[in-house]
Image (tube, rainbow, N blue to C red):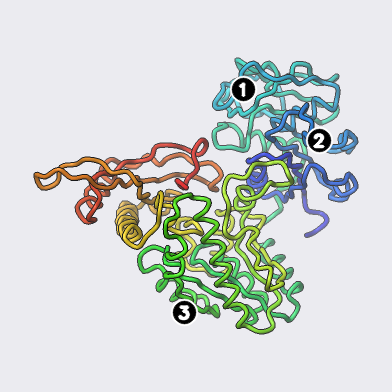
Amino acid sequence: MKKSRSKILIIDFGSQYTQLIARKIRESKVYCEIYPFNSPLDKIKDFNADGIILSGGPSSVYDKDAPVVSKEIFKLEVPFLGICYGMQIMAHLLGGEVMPAKNREYGHSNLKIIKESKLFKGCGKSSRVWMSHGDIIVKIPHSFTVTAQTETCDAASFESREKKMYGLQFHPEVIHTACGTTILNNFLFDIAKVKGDWELNDFISGKVGEIKEAVSGKMAICALSGGVDSTVAAVLTNLAIKDRLKCIFVDNGLLRETEANSVMKYYRENLNLHVKLVNASGLFLKELKGVADPERKRKIIGKLFIKIFEKEAEKIKGVNFLVQGTLYPDVIESVKVFGASSIIKSHHNVGGLPKKLNLKLIEPLRELFKDEVRIIGKNIGVPDEIIKRQPFPGPGLAIRIIGEVDKRRLDVLRKADAIVTEEIKKAGLYDKVWQSFPVLVPVKTVGVMGDKRSYESLIALRAVTSADGMTADFAKLDYDILRTCSSRIISEIKGINRVVYDITSKPPSTIEWE
C-alpha cells in the first residue's frame, strides 16, 4: 500500500453495520480499515488517516461497560464523522449531554435539513433516513450547531465546521437511508478531501504477494464447499503458491441436486485445483438424526466437518497453513466483534480451525463483502457458473429444513430447490436476486387433491434482493413465477400440498430461516 494513498479509519463500537460503512467507502474507491474502539491511541495516530468515522453501536454512553475512546483522539487534526452511537460518544466526550429517549426510534424517519451543511450537499431540504437508537442528544457541545431534525429527534445531525467534526443520529450506510451514499461521499471528498484511488486489482496483487511471503515455500490446504467464497480464496492462494495448495471437498449429503459432481468438474477442468472429493453423507445424516434445534444442527455439522477434514488433512504430509473463505459478514454474525456486537448465528468457517493440525490460518477474503469477492473472482478467472451462484449456507439444506433432517425430507427439499432455481433462471432473475430458495416447514395443512382431502407438508419460498447480505428486502416476484413454482412443487413432489411466500425483510428477519 502506497503512502500517498488516501485512507479512512473506522472506529468500531460494535454496530452490526460497521462493515457496511467500510463497504460503502470502498465502493467509492477509498481505502479504509476498521479498528476496535479500544485500540491504543498511538496505533490510531500511526494509521495516519485522512478522516475518522465513529461507528454506531448497541450500548448507551452511560452503561457501566460502554465502549469509549480516549478524548485525546479528537485532538487529531483530521475530520470526524460520528454515526448514531458515534455521534453520541462525540457529544458525551466533548461536553454535550445524552439521555434515554422516551421512545426508542427504529425504522424510517423524515429528516428535515434546517441549516446548510457540506454533509447534505445534493440531498434537498428533506430526506428519508433510517434510525436505530434508544438515546438522544439533549445538549450539543460548545461550538457545535444542529443542522437537521426529525419529528422525534431535535439533534438528528450536528457539526462544528471549525473543528471539522460532524455527527449523524441516523445510519447513512444502510440502503434504507435515501441520501446515505451522497452523505458519506460528501464527507469523504468535500470534507476529508480524499481521492478515489483504491482498486480491487491492487487488493489482488497485494494479497497474492502476502500469501506468497507468508507461506514461503511451504504447503497449505483448503476446504472447498463449492461456493464463491472458498473457491475464490483457493484460486487466489493457488496464484501465489501453485501446486503447494491441496484442496478437500467434503460432500456432506446436504447439497443441492448434482451439486458435488458439477463443482468438482469445474475445480479440476476449469481452475486446475488439486482437489480430493470425500463422500461423507451417511455420517452427517447419522449425526443429525433426531436433532431439531438450528444451532445444534449447525454445531454438529461444523464439528463433524472439522473431524472429517482433520482426518483427510493428516494424510497430506508437510502442511503448515489452512486457507478459509471467511468474509466480513461471517465475522460480524458469528463473533462478538471487538467485544461489542451481538452473536446472531454461528458460521462453519469462523473459529473452525482444526486445533490438532496446528496450522496457521490464511483468510485472504476476510476484509471483503460478497460483491467484492465476485469481482475479484471474475478478475482471476473463476467461471461465471461459480461466480454468479447465489450464496449457499455452509450447513447446506439442513438449515432450510425446519426441524429434524432425514433423507426423505432432504429429497423433498432438493426437488423443490431444483424447481425454484429452474423457474428463477427461466425468468431471467437468477443474477438479479440475492438468494431464492424453498424452505421445508414442519407444518401440515389440509388440502384437496384428486377429489380427496390431503394432510401434507408446507413449502415456504424465500427470495430477497441485497447488495451484501447484511440487509435485504424480499423480492417482488411476479405472481406468474410464484404460481408456476407453487403448481410444479405441489404436482411434482409427493407430500406437499401448500406453498407460501415469505415477504419479510432483513432486519427484522434473517435471510435464512434458521
- Which one is in front in this view, the residue at disc 3 or the one at disc 1? 1
Q: Quadrant of the N terminus?
A: bottom right
**Picture residue at 74% right of the left edge, 23% below the top:** 158
Residue 214 appearing in the image:
yes
What crowding class fits label 1: few (fewer than 14 Cα within 10 Å), some (14-19), or many (20 or more)?
some
Q: Which label's residue is closer to the chain start, 3 or 1?
A: 1
Residue 247, given in percent of the width and then of the height, sits at 57, 75
Does residue 153 sit above or below 202 in this rendering? Answer: above
Does residue 187 sit above or below 100 in this rendering? Answer: below
Q: Which residue carries the number 1 mark?
A: 104
The circle drawn on residue 269 is 3
Question: For the residue marked with disc 1, what is the amino acid?
Answer: Arg
Question: For the residue marked with disc 3, what is the amino acid?
Answer: Glu
The circle drawn on residue 68 is 2
Tag count: 3
**Picture residue at 43% right of the left edge, 69% below the top:** 281
Question: For the residue marked with disc 2, what is the amino acid?
Answer: Val
Q: Secondary structure at mark 1?
A: strand
**Picture residue at 73% right of the left edge, 75% below the top:** 215
Q: CA distance from mark 3 to mark 2?
A: 52 Å
What crowding class fits label 2: few (fewer than 14 Cα within 10 Å), some (14-19), or many (20 or more)?
some
Q: Secondary structure at mark 3?
A: helix
Query: In the image, is 319 to the left or to the right of 272?
Result: right
Q: Residue 88: name its quadrant.
A: top right
Q: CA distance from mark 1 to mark 2?
A: 22 Å
Q: Secondary structure at mark 2?
A: loop
Camera-side residue: 53 or 291? 291
- Which one is in front in this view, the residue at disc 3 or the one at disc 2? 2
Q: CA distance from mark 3 to mark 1?
A: 55 Å
Query: In the image, is 311 to the left or to the right of 206?
Result: left
